[in-house]
Amino acid sequence: MIGTEEVKLSKSWSQATFSVSSLSRTAAEITAALRVQPSRHFERGERLSRRHPESGPRTESLWLLKSPLSADTPLDEHVGWLLNFIEERCAALKALSSECTFAISCGFSSESGQGGFVLDSSMLLRLTILPIDLVVDLYPPSDVGDIEP
């Protein structure tokens, strides 16, 4: 989910993606239920990697919506944008919840290797609208040798 050209241009960046995965629903069915095209999607049974034909098949369908905010936008704003999307489609997502799992995956990197972000209490409460996992991946700066201990 991480790795766009925009992200590669900066040593400091953040981004977030909302995912819906299912063992029984197809990505096309999830798209129809939410009435919005995903940023990316994968169907159960497809190869895990199109570049590596020997890779195994996907065990579940995956529907991904990436925050459209720029990579230099603070991470909490990416999460807030996704929460607005989730709240607007709460009824449809609740209808899918018995057959789907939900997550917000976040990526974060700083120029110095130090840094963080805050999800305030109101945002944390908003995350409980559905059973949503929050995944945070931290990426060190590319020039690790430039960081002082």
Image (tube, grey):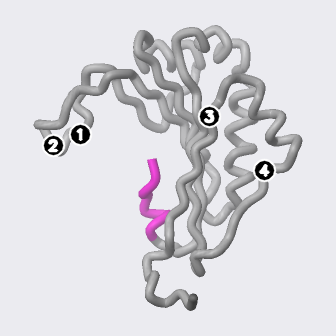
Q: Which of marks 3 and 2 is nearer the N terminus?
A: 2
The residue under the point 58% across, 33% down is 103
> Where is mark 2, residue-wise?
52
Q: Give the range drawn in magenta.
A: 1-8
Residue 43, horizontal then vertical, whole percent: 34, 23
Side (left or right) of 82 relative to 12 = right
Side (left or right) of 50 relative to 87 = left
Q: Is residue 71 magenta?
A: no
Dividing the picture into quadrants, the one containing residue 98 is top right
Residue 96, horizontal then vertical, whole percent: 59, 12
Closer to the camera, 122 or 63?
122
Q: Earlier in the sequence, mark 1 or mark 3?
A: 1
**SS of the residue at dot 3?**
strand
> Where is mark 3, residue-wise?
133
> Where is mark 1, residue-wise?
49
**CA distance for labels 2 and 4:** 38 Å
Circle 4: residue type: Leu
